[in-house]
Image (cartoon, rainbow, N blue to C red):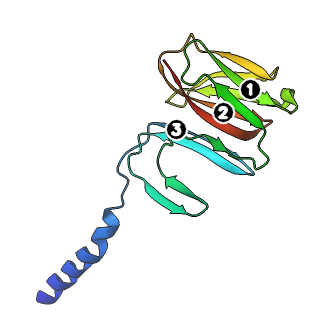
Amino acid sequence: MQYIKAILLFSICILEPYCLFAQETTLTAGKDFASSNGNFSFSIGQVVYTSNANSSGSVEQGVQQTYLISILEETQKNISIYPNPTRDFLNLKIENDTLNEYSYKLFDLKGKLLLENQVQSEISQIPMTAFPKSSYSLCVTKGEELIQSFKLTKH
């Protein structure tokens, strides 16, 4: 009987740490974008993350990057947004490239696609008046490849 208790106690001690890494929350929404140069993803509802860093950068695994501006193409074109934060209109500026290959998508915090358009000129004016005060993600793509993403705020 003592032998069985000892085995049971030993098993609990060995297996308990694995139980601590169980899923702590259910994600309510999210979206993934991928290209040959990298990926961008976001999730809503996840509260646990791991941080890894070295001399070339850092990664926050499992966390929504709140104010991240990600650049996925090494030969990045000059792409910018202004003003951020914004009220009525957001300007997307793309310099020195074939503009008709670019498009942009605006997402809310839940990952819902709010607006999608092709870039027609060097400065595209994106209307924000129809959207409530909040934070948004703007993803700029060239064809199917995500080039850059911005986190923006509407006041």
Left or right of residue 144, residue 38 in this image: left
The answer to which image quadrant residue 8 occupies is: bottom left
Dot 1 alpha-carbon crowd within 10 angstroms: few under 14, some 14 to 19, many 20 or more: some
| Quarter location, residue 5 | bottom left
Q: Nearer the viewer, mark 1 or mark 2?
A: 1
Task: Name the amino acid type tagged 2.
Answer: Cys
Image point (85%, 26%), residue name: 100
Q: Residues within 10 Å of mark 3 (few under 14, many from 20)?
A: few
On the rendered structure, is 104 left or right of 26? right
Please, is residue 36 above or below residue 154 in the view?
below
Q: Earlier in the sequence, mark 1 or mark 2?
A: 1
Near mark 2 (Cα within 10 A), the count class, few <14, some 14-19 or many ≥20, is: many
Q: Nearer the viewer, residue 49 or 153?
A: 153
Mark 2 — residue?
139
Please report whichever mark, 3 or 2, sits nearer to the chain's N-terminal start. Answer: 3
Q: Quadrant of the N terminus?
A: bottom left
Q: Residue furthest left?
A: 1
| Residue 152 in picture, x, y percent from top left | 56, 28
Q: In the displayed structure, does residue 8 sit left or right of residue 154?
A: left
> What number is the disc on residue 93?
1
Q: Residue at x 41, y 40 (%)?
A: 45
Q: CA distance from mark 3 to mark 1?
A: 19 Å
- Who comes first in sequence, dot 3 or dot 1? 3
Looking at the picture, which amino acid does disc 1 mark? Lys
Q: Quadrant of residue 7?
A: bottom left
Q: Which residue is mark 3?
A: 67
Picture mark count: 3
Q: Is residue 116 left or right of residue 98?
A: left
Q: Amino acid at mark 3?
A: Tyr
Q: Nearer the viewer, residue 114 or 88?
A: 88
Q: Secondary structure at mark 3?
A: loop
- The relative height of residue 34 versus residue 54 in the rendered view (above or below) is above
